[in-house]
Image (cartoon, rainbow, N blue to C red):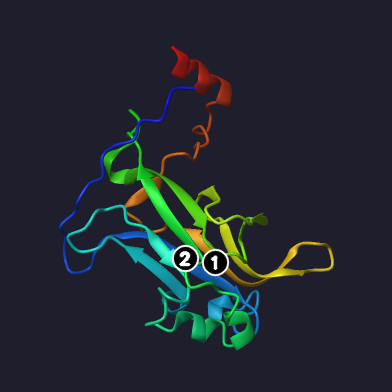
Amino acid sequence: APAVQMLPPRVVRGPAVMPLLWTLECIYSEGALERGAAAHVPREQRSLLRRQEVGGLLLCTQRVGRMFQEQDEFFRTFVPDEEKRGAVSREHFQIWADEMAPSGTAAATEGVPCAFFLTNYSRQGTIVNGALLRQCGEQVSLHSGDVIALSRGAAAAGDGRPSTFLEFKFDLAGSVLRDALVVESPPRGRSASATASGAAS
């Protein structure tokens, strides 16, 4: 496979409402937001929005933890239990993106092509799509719709899986970025083999 070409970071000097990069939508919180009840709480109230910073780089890191969401009291609201809140590290994880070279078929209106990543910084670990990142600095790629969960360390469910108390969905809806690593399905009426042969010609 050809090597991925990274581009230098870009700076955007924009309007008062800066471009949305991605959203971490809280979809479950034990004791505060039960499964299936998220629709009863406005999405903006249970979401951590990451926007481009004024005068800064378009691609900026999002740091999640008690130290970084303290002012808006997000964790006090959605993790009211003090013991569970203590399992949220001061810096639990980071989400960041690398800009990729656009493909020849992508339209400019589709957004800036990027690869997205999550890095764990907590001794408690961070769970992504059911896989536990145990080591500090361990990272995994992210895609829109992926579920990020926090657990109480060694505590586990009956089937051996970590017992989660807070879950987010990583969402690119409304973002000025797009996932460059997602392989889109071929158009209707055109088979995958035809697409592959066309790309090879």
Residue 81 appears in view = no
Of residues 110 and 82, the one drawn nearer to the viewer in this rendering: 82
**Circles 1 and 2: CB atoms closer than 8 Å:** yes
Q: Position of residue 41 (x, y in %)?
A: 51, 81
Location of residue 156 by image quarter: bottom right
Residue 22 drawn above or below residue 193 = below
Tally of numbered discs: 2
Above/below status of 99 relative to 172: above
The x and y percentages for residue 179 are 43, 45
Q: Secondary structure at mark 2?
A: strand
Residue extending furthest right?
158
Task: Name the amino acid type tagged 2.
Answer: Leu
Q: Which mark is residue 168?
A: 1
Crowdedness near tag 2: few (<14), some (14–19) or many (≥20) residues, C-alpha within 10 Å: many
Asked where in the image residue 4 lies, by quadrant, the reply is top left
Task: Answer above or below: position of 7 versus 78.
Answer: above
Residue at the image point whose x is 51% and y is 16% from the top: 197
Taking the spot 65% from the left edge, 85% from the top edge, the residue there is: 31
Image location (x, y in percent) of residue 135: 60, 55
Residue at the spot 49% in from the left edge and 33% down from the top edge: 187
Q: Nearer the viewer, residue 128 or 39?
A: 128
Which residue matches tag 2? 24
Q: Earlier in the sequence, mark 1 or mark 2?
A: 2
The answer for how far apart the CA atoms under marks 1 and 2 are is: 6 Å
SS category of the residue bearing label 1: strand
